[in-house]
Image: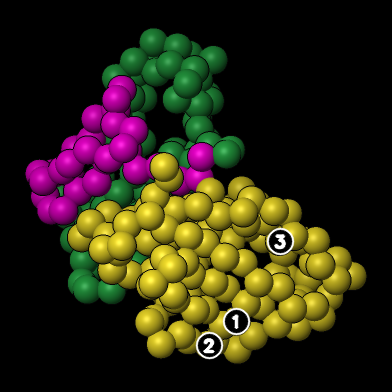
Chain colours: A yellow, B green
Amino acid sequence: RKEVEQDPGPFNVPEGATVAFNCTYSNSASQSFFWYRQDCRKEPKLLMSVYSSGNEDGRFTAQLNRASQYISLLIRDSKLSDSATYLCVVNHNFNKFYFGSGTKLNVKP
Amino acid sequence: DAGITQSPRHKVTETGTPVTLRCHQTENHRYMYWYRQDPGHGLRLIHYSYGVKDTDKGEVSDGYSVSRSKTEDFLLTLESATSSQTSVYFCAVSPGLAQDTQYFGPGTRLTVL
């Protein structure tokens, strides 16, 4: 079983739509959680950390559900520039990070 | 910007030849990592380092070796490249503090013919 699983998509949404991604992780001892964004042929870049209480950064909201072992990312008012692959990342061995395969988002005009 | 560079950025080589990829950082972060990224597999950890001369294996370490003789440099060596090692290789660094995340270099695209 993979450490981190994501729906690969693609999610095709119109501009202005709200879209949500989920990610599940297998190790209940996981300690820290992140969402990264990766543009085509570029390196992954940190989008946001995910805290137990949930957190928001502008149009982006991340939630953590430890009981069900999943994290989510909500994007409101989607922009064309949000088109990318979103990677879910989990850390449960100190400083070893486990990546999902990514969810592809296409925002259409 | 974590000041991470990778060299070379692109390389084409032949099966059986040795290849060394270099990762250089300017922020003196303790932890450094090498990943490979392939379609359908996401990022997979090859090796990582938790200090000068301190390294450990990741999930896909076979066929790869690493060295870290200075804080700022982490080298990945393919002793005898195979076509299955054609991939995009990313270096990452982390300060190593609680809840810290990773920062990635721009990647090296390696093709083994």
Amino acid type, residue under disc 2 in the picture: Glu
- When the figure is inspected, residue A20 is found, relative to residue B41, above or below; the finding is below
Q: Which residues are magenta?
A: B41-69
**Which residue appears at 24% of the width and 46% of the height?**
B48
Magenta stretch encompasses residue B77: no
- When the figure is inspected, residue B6 is found, relative to residue B19, above or below; the finding is below
Estimate the x, y position of residue A70 in percent, counting from the top left. Answer: 47, 66
Any part of residue A9 in sight: yes
* Residues behind callouts 3 and 2 on a single chain: yes
Q: Is residue A13 left or right of residue A66?
A: right
Magenta stretch encompasses residue B63: yes
Estimate the x, y position of residue B88 in percent, counting from the top left. Answer: 50, 38
Kindly indicate the quadrant of the structure image that contains residue A77: bottom right
Residue where numbered disc 1 is placed: A60
Q: State the residue in front, B96 or A100.
A: A100
Amino acid type, residue under disc 3 in the picture: Leu
Q: For the residue labelled by badge 3, is the local secondary structure a helix, a strand or a loop?
A: strand
